[in-house]
Image (cartoon, coloured by chain):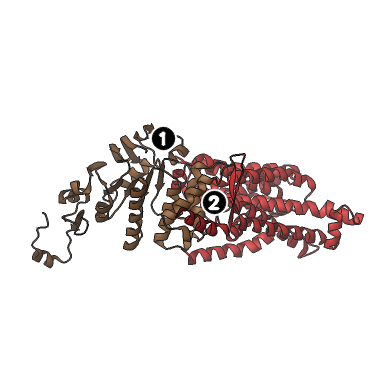
Amino acid sequence: MRSKHLAAEKKASGSRYTALRSRRLPASALLDKRAVLAAIVLAAAIILMVLFSAGIGTMRIHPLDVLKVFAGQGQEVHKTVVFQFRLPRIALSLLVGASLAASGAIVQGMIRNPLASPDLVGITNGAAVAATSLIALTGGAASVRWLPLAAICGAAAAALLIYVLAWKRGVTPLRLVLVGIGLSSALSAITSVMVIASPLRIAGQALVWLTGSVYGAAWSGVLTLLPWTAAGLALAFVLARQVSAQQLGDDIAVGLGSRLQLQRLALLALSVALAGSAVALAGGIAFIGLMAPHMARRLVGPAFGAALPVAALCGGLLMLAADLAARTVFMPTEIPAGVFTAAIGAPFFIYLLRRRRSSP
Amino acid sequence: MTKLTASNLSLAYGRQLIIDNLDFAVPEGRITVLIGANGSGKSTLLRALARLMKPEAGAVLLDGKDIAHTSTKEVARKLAMLPQGPVAPEGITVLQLVKQGRYPYQSWLQQWSEADERAVRAALEATGMTPLAERPVDALSGGQRQRAWIAMTLAQGTATVLLDEPTTYLDLTHQIEILDLLYTLNEREGRTVVMVLHDMNLACRYAHHLVAVKDRGIYAQGAPGDIVNAELIRNVFELDAHIIPDPLYGTPLCIPASQARRAQERQAAVPVHA
């Protein structure tokens, strides 16, 4: 009887999962093969996209020549174009996309709503107020160096304010959303005032920031963001179990032994660090935090350990594609990448709403 | 075995006192059913027993220790709780859901030990969910879905399982199916079951120990056959009813008096207020 049901289960779970167990350490995991496959396919797509993207621009370089440049060969002029101009931008796009996606995945899991995004906990709007204020108040002078710092401080301050206002013997997802929506509209009103009150040139600069762009990215920016993204993703992976538990609802999470409020605060801080750092370097890129986690869940389901890496890869790919379009569609005129993420994102959002209405 | 008791327990929502200075010991290895009118506080009491609600005063004790001051993971290894009408994340499979029951035993490094695997398999088997393990929970019928959630609480491997109205939203067939499942778990594995039920007759059939909650406290408790009578129904539910023995099982059967079909009532020659 016992061996019979073991055999039956093996057949059932053998299709998708492999158990990994260390003999020496008390370490084990259940590997979702479907997630591994999805991650490999997405990573391959990203590599192809990088090769293709690095070759496109005012100077066209064949993907094979791009490969040569990566291998340390190829023409000097190709090297300069690829390494100095295109690669920093590509790398920054990947980091920004992955960070926003991971942040969105955490927020959606925590709030238990697939329509949630980092914007909802005030991150984008807080960063926007700080950034536009800095641009407007300094007349655009001091802004380039201090903009990232101002943006991430604004994001953290807004998220903290929302958290504190939503606190009432603990924070529930619903109160977080309601307070978040309220405060976000107040913040975006302040942003509008800043933009409207500024001279035209300054207002233009602020608007480009608000739309979001990786235009003019340099290696210094990539190196600034890299530790945030790397540490953030690693920490998100460590906390994946907590998100999976919170996805079941507060009562069940507590019943399972989760330290709900402490973990919720940690997850919120993590999503602020991830999205805030990305927004600091690329401005208010919209919809990636909404779309990428959703695509990941469609591919591998909601178990967070599997959905998180896949979401990060989806986000990187989306942002890469958006910036490629931003650089090339109206060449030689540059469009902020945020225009393209919004152009895909808005219809996607409506599609999500319609799909949810048809299924209870 | 674990011992779950409430001592001088008072519960409140804001200023409204729901339970006032209640003492109660959950009988070990038995099925206990809490009954009471809507808003009587029976669900609140259950939530407090599962540490989902903080007491205003008094304490809930698990093996003599105040659960409010015990590590929540430690409590989760002894006590599982299934709230009313849980909603699974979109697209989650039965196996992924049941696996969550192992949370209190897992750590960052130890995410799928052999004990985890055994417990999840046993839980799927006990609830008959093994063939459906790979199916998404939202594609299941109501009864199957509830069985998946019960499997999750079973995988938690606790001696005590608390359930808040586990049969709500289910048709009669599935209500019986779920209650039979809980009955079997109690018989075979000796798990202590505490649940809130609305159906008086099913409560009487399945409970070893019935607890009637009324006026912020326990009105009566004991074996259904010992405590259920017309007076209890009148006082607890404010309903006139006739109690007869269930013709099949002998447990109390409650026949409520109502406005409908009063003509036949006269012919029956049974006084309603017996």
Q: Amino acid at mark 1?
A: Ala
With respect to residue A14, does A172 lie above or below? above
A171 left or right, relative to A106: left
Q: Which chain is brown?
A: B
Q: Position of residue A45 (x, y in %)?
A: 72, 60
**Which element is circle 2 on?**
helix
Q: Which chain is red?
A: A
Q: Which mark is residue B68?
A: 1
Q: Quadrant of the C terminus of chain B?
A: bottom left
**Which element is circle 1 on?**
helix
**Does label 2 lie on the same chain as label 1?**
no
**Outermost residue toward the right in this view:** A76
Q: Position of residue A151 (x, y in %)?
A: 66, 45
> Which of these two is toward me, B55 or A139?
B55
Q: Position of residue A17 (x, y in %)?
A: 58, 55
Q: Quadrant of the N terminus of chain B?
A: top left
Q: Amino acid at mark 2?
A: Gly
Mark pair 1, 2: CA separation: 27 Å
Q: Which mark is residue A109?
A: 2
Q: Position of residue A136 (x, y in %)?
A: 69, 47
| Chain letter behind tag 1 | B
